[in-house]
Amino acid sequence: MTEASAQAVGEGPVALTDGIHLVVDALKLNEVKTIYGVVGIPVTDLARLAQAEGIRFIGFRHESNAAHAAAAAGFLTGKPGICLTVSGPGFLNGLVGLANATTNCFPMVQISGSSERHIVDLQRGDYEELDQLAAAKNFAKAAYRIHRAEDIGRGIARALRTAAAGRPGGVYLDVPAAVLGEIIAAAKGEESLWQVTDLAPRQLPAPEAVDRAIDLLAAAHRPLIVLGKGAAYARADAQLKEFIETTGIPYVPMSMAKGLLPDDHPQSAATARSLALRRADVVMLVGARLNWLLSHGDAPTWNPDAKFIQVDIAAAELDSNQPIAAPLVGDIGSVLDALIERGKPGRITAPQDWRDELKERTDVNVAKMAERMAAAETAHPMKFLGALRSIRDVLAEHPEAYVVNEGANALDLTRNAVGMRVPRHRLDSGTWGVMGIGMGYAIAAAVETGAPVVAIEGDSAFGFSGMELETITRYRLPVTTVVLNNGGVYRGDDPSASSDPAPTYLSARHDLMIEAFGGTGYRAATPGETAAALRRAIGAGRPALVDCVIDPSDGTESGRIGHLNPKGLAGNR
Ligand code: ADP
Ligand code: TPW
């Protein structure tokens, strides 16, 4: 009812609201602080109003990057990150980020405007026509559509709850243009909103399940804990430290679990990983899946007689690859509380000979790595490890800095070379091994924390989101991008089979790119120049990019996962 019509029937003026206001009010009520997105029909006014109402709107150049940013915000804050997209192709661009968030178990909500239902559903050919709800269902933890302005509060509550509770993931929320424009009485609108209570309720394991796991660990000769990014997400840092240190069990961190305990912790078996996996007889997975990244738990990577304990919030994850002898379903904080409480002091103690075995291998491998890095120091042209040694040293001066990392060699080598000392400070290509997360994750880390961010990028990887350098400079974010530029996908010296460049060949001066947007570009050809540039860039706290000139012949095809390339006839050559 319009104000005019309300007056016409003699009821006096009725305060009105519309769908756009209700979306913003519902987000505010649920304490959403930031929206990452790209504007256009039908969501431009929504972004404007959100900004006017005190929600920060970070406008991107491409929705994929905005969605990756929202996902990273979800991981970093423990509350769903919000991404806003326009209908049709804008929605589809964002879907990559939503799917990646779901794969990584990060909570986020993609809110998208959509075109007129009565035209879309008869496929009459609307502006940006697409059945977005049907498309999103395949790629999200859940997908919902709001049909009436009075359901906006319910829709947003439902989306936030689903994204955060249980196994976190990406939720799609479709808001047609007609709903955004729908006018209803303000009082009715206000009554329809609610704040979600206890977004991700604790989930406690059963006592007998806890005792079963304790019995296994107590009888183990070579126990091992594997920490995954679910453990980082769970924010049970104190309990993890207590459990690991009181039991003495060695642990291996997956890449985004690095820093949960400092990487130089005496019980870290990260640098004796192959031996630890091959020899362990009882393995406790904490927020880590037995997927391809852990060779599905199979021999010969693993001891074929190993028994697995799995701590996970998603019961259906268990037994997905190997028999789980002791399932511990619950949130990691509650499970660890129960393990600490029910495991009597001294009941679980990792045998000293096992710890010594791993320590010996760790010492050997650390020495080998130091040798390789020292050798790279003087190599010219600069090698990955030469640059990374400098990056490692400068980052050691800034433990508060967030590290974003993607590429192939750039990913594998950085993961090993750059130690982390603080939880949840490393974000990378994750479960999919996806390229393109770099600038989105970096922007979210800077926006959500205000801390310095260093994105360590392969040159190919960087290109997927490189235009967001403009976003970084527009919002003056303290992000330094370091491009390990060896001139190609994997490497830059592949021969070409035609007059065109080889499929893997790339060529760019990324330092000049950021200058175009008003940031500071550095070019570094030696480890010394790399260190100096990075130190200055982090110190300045302004957008910067260091283009490291890396030997084009340094790097291997697909980094550490070259064996996943199909061989076919090439295998006989
Ligand atoms: P990584 O790649 O580091 O090995 P994964 O993404 O494979 O880690 O595994 C993360 C696991 O953590 C998922 O199976 C997810 O269900 C689980 N998880 C996420 N949050 C929690 C939590 N709060 N408590 C328990 N498990 C969780
Ligand atoms: C969305 C395939 C895996 S790694 C990579 C590509 C294109 C880039 C490797 O080169 P880079 O790093 O970044 O220069 P480096 O250090 O080895 O030289 N599209 C998507 N995701 C993936 N994983 C790819 C393509 C890929």
Image (spheres, rainbow, N blue to C red):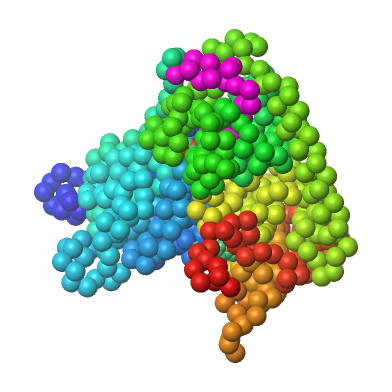
Which residues are drawn in magenta?
Answer: 209-234
Quarter of the picture containing the C terminus is bottom right
Pick the front one: 510 or 561: 561
Residue 527, picture quadrant: bottom right
Residue in view at x 30 percent, y 58 percent: 135
* Residue 384 visible at all: yes
Query: Residue 242's x, y, as percent?
Result: 65, 21
Pick the front one: 316 or 478: 316
Pick the front one: 49 or 436: 436
Q: Residue furthest bottom?
A: 499
Residue 442, picture quadrant: bottom right
> Is-magenta flag for residue 398?
no
Pick the front one: 493 or 402: 493
Query: Residue 555's x, y, as percent?
Result: 69, 64
Instruction: Describe residue 549's horizontal placement relative to residue 444 as left or right.
Output: right
Q: Residue furthest front?
A: 572
Residue in view at x 33 percent, y 46 percent: 142
Q: Is residue 489 above or below residue 237?
A: below
Residue in view at x 46 percent, y 24 percent: 326
Q: Is residue 29 above or below residue 384?
A: above
Query: Residue 489's x, y, as percent?
Result: 61, 69
Q: Residue furthest right?
A: 378
> Is-magenta flag for residue 226?
yes
Q: Main secondary structure of the magenta part?
A: helix
Query: Residue 454's x, y, as percent?
Result: 69, 54
Instruction: Describe residue 537's horizontal placement relative to residue 107 as left or right.
Output: right
* Residue 17 visible at all: no
Q: Is residue 226 above or below residue 68?
A: above
